[in-house]
Amino acid sequence: MREVTISDDMIRLGQFLKLADVIEAGSDVKYLLNTEDVTVNGEPEDRRGRQLFKGDVVTVGDDITLVVA
């Protein structure tokens, strides 16, 4: 499990995926969410605006990332 540090209390899923180097550009988020299995805390997620907080776990395929502040 990788840890990715955020600078604020909250970050949106699309921004987090870019920060975590899962995608190269923000415009890639929609495609990723439509073609890959993305979960937040074990629940399927397809909203790029989903708010993430410290302690949330984001999984894209086999890549597991923990949100830390």
Image: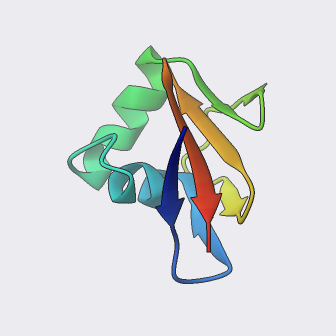
Nearer-the-camera pick, 19 or 69: 69
Q: How is the image coloured?
A: rainbow
Quarter of the rendering occupied by the C terminus: bottom right
Return the x and y of residue 7 as percentages of the image width and height.
52, 82
Which of the 4 quarters of the picture holds residue 45? Answer: top right
Residue at 38% x, 41% y is: 29
Using the image, determine if residue 16 lies above or below residue 68: above
Q: Is residue 37 left or right of residue 9?
A: left
Which of the 4 quarters of the picture holds residue 23? Answer: top left
Residue at 62% x, 65% y is: 68
Of all residues shown, which one is farthest toward the front? 1
Return the x and y of residue 16 as percentages of the image width and height.
47, 57
Q: Number of marks in the image?
A: 0
Quarter of the rendering occupied by the N terminus: top right
Of all residues shown, which one is farthest toward the bottom? 8
Nearer-the-camera pick, 33 or 43: 43
Which of the 4 quarters of the picture holds residue 67? Answer: bottom right
Q: Is residue 6 left or right of residue 55?
A: left
Using the image, determine if residue 26 lies above or below residue 40: below
Q: Is residue 5 visible?
A: yes
Nearer-the-camera pick, 6 or 27: 6
Residue at 61% x, 49% y is: 66
Q: Is residue 49 visible?
A: no
Using the image, determine if residue 22 lies above or below residue 19: above
Return the x and y of residue 39 as percentages of the image width and height.
66, 30
